[in-house]
Amino acid sequence: MTSTTEATIDEIVVIALAEAFRGDGEILCNAIGTLPMCSGRLARATFEPDMVYTDGVSVLVANTLPVGVPDAPIVPEAYIPYRTVFDVVWSGRRHVVMGASQIDIWGNQNFAAIGDDYSKPKAQLLGMRGAPGNLINNTTSYWIPNHSKRVFVPKVDVVSGPGYDRMRELGAEASRFHEIRRVVTPLAALDFETDDNRMRLRSVHPGVSVDQVVENTGFELVIPDDVPESRLPSAEELSVLRNEIDPLGLRKGEFA
Amino acid sequence: MPDKTMTEHDVVGELADGMTVGIGGWGSRRKPMSLVRAILRSDLKNLTIVSYGGPDIGLLAKSGKVSKLAYGFVSLDSIALEPHFRQARQAGGLEVLELDEGAFQLGLLAAAHRVPFYPCRAGLGSDMLKHNPELRTVKSPYDDGEELVAIPAMKLDVALIHMNRADAAGNGQFLGPDLYFDDLFAMAADRTFMSCEKIVATEDFLTEGSVHTLRIPRIFVDGVVEAPRGAHFTECPPDYPRDEAFQAEYAATARDPEAWDTFKARYIDAPSHEAYLAEVDAR
């Protein structure tokens, strides 16, 4: 039997991101990427049993599905081709986890392109993809594997996913479906639960200091007087994660 | 029923410089690659390409066939960033309409329905509007008065799609997990040319899939090209998966002009789809 003291940093991060889904209930968990998938599937296997998630292709699966095992048996509960995914985005019954090449204090996210000249970017990245629609329609969280000043910047080059300052400009009605729930990195969990929705340090992972987070963030985070430590996984959570959700340990690959 | 069978060469003969061409599929999935290569071998130029982009956009942009791109994303799926597309963007000079990937389908739907736009929230607050100044917003005429983004109709001169099966009259069948938006591409276009893995008799459609897989009706199709492995190296399940080794080779040529020249001479310039497949199989 695994004891919680043996949890490694990747497992603590999986839990920190799984916590973003707490309270979501019966919605589509669209966690993009290996580690976010672990988090979403762990949340459903434990404390958010009513959530639905996809096999990554076109069906919602009723069973606990391991990540990175293409021939794992699935129990389909609904057919959800891309067209239906977009319908779900617009319905709002969804919580998406995306990445970010840049993010700022208001949660403005860029994974579209780097550089000032959009007609000739220094680095073309993913493009807008679904970020503009995701942010304005449903709850969004971010998993950012590289917590550094290159990513946590004072100003993003392109706003693909708009943050809270942009929402204030739009007004309360247009922004009523916007919520950036959580930002999780290998160092910390962050949120926007402040008076003016600036990014706040929510918890540091065990072994990480507040100073370490501050040194690697290119803007002034809101730091509460007491910053708690991110919680450890329970024995049950560790067992489900290691044995059922990520038996190949693929989550560790995001900590290169 | 009419017989609309033709060749890739015939399809290219129906295209002209400056046309707006929509390409079905999604990323590196069920792309009409034999038709794309036929365009690459032709003298066509100044095309506007509308696509949920994969190697179709990478190849056409790399080869200087394109003056404008409209896309929600460009990706090779297993290789997140399309390297040839990135190079073309970073070199500058390419006009782009970059939409939220969900909003993108509304442009096709508006064209299909012959209305000027469909409204959505996607784009509000982001730089999608700033970087695409042709996009406008619209105010709801109802009491809510909400301001929304008006995604303009993306009217296509021609759509190119690839199906698993088709009949000679132009009915198309997808047997994989997702139709993507191929029906919208066909309906948004003045003319649609559809390649397929295999042309079958109409009465044989239901031996391989339920009636729900018959999603491309022939009223929207003008030509049918039988192209076995016509989506290679993109995936075309259940007929075949993506050729990941070939895709990796394609992607690597972005870093090395000599490697690209060799790749192009061997595969892209192969004079027919059959010759291309022979080169692929001889690797």
Image (cartoon, rainbow, N blue to C red):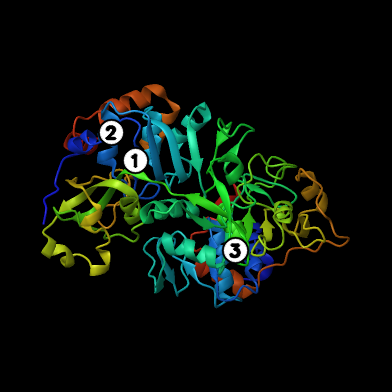
Identify the image quadrant of the N terminus of chain A: bottom right
Q: Are marks 3 and 1 on the same chain?
A: no
The correct choice, above or below, for B95 with respect to A32 in the image is: above
Q: Residue at x 52, y 30 (%)?
A: B90
Residue occupying the far right of the picture: A225
Q: Give the residue at the far top of this rendering.
A: B258
Asked whether disc 3 touches disc 1, contact meaning CB atoms under 8 Å apart, the reply is: no
Question: Taking A168 as reference, is B190 above or below it?
Answer: above
The residue wearing badge 2 is: B39
**Marks 1/2: CA distance?**
11 Å
Labels 1 & 2 near each other (Cβ < 8 A): yes
Q: Residue at x 80, y 53 (%)?
A: A209
- Dot 2: element: helix
User: Residue A21 falls in which quadrant of the image?
Assistant: bottom right
Q: Amino acid at mark 1?
A: Val
**Which residue is under mark 3?**
A138
For mark 2, does the 10 Å Cα neighbourhood hold few (<14), some (14 to 19), or many (20 or more) residues? many
Could you tell me which residue is drawn at 54 percent across and 45 percent down?
Answer: B135
Q: Nearer the viewer, residue A52 or A209?
A: A52
Q: In the rendered image, which residue does mark 1 sit on?
A: B21
Mark drawn on residue A227: none
* B101 in relation to A63, above or below: above
Q: Position of residue A101 (x, y in %)?
A: 62, 44
Which chain letter goes with mark 3? A
Looking at the image, residue B46 sits to the left or right of residue A218; the answer is: left
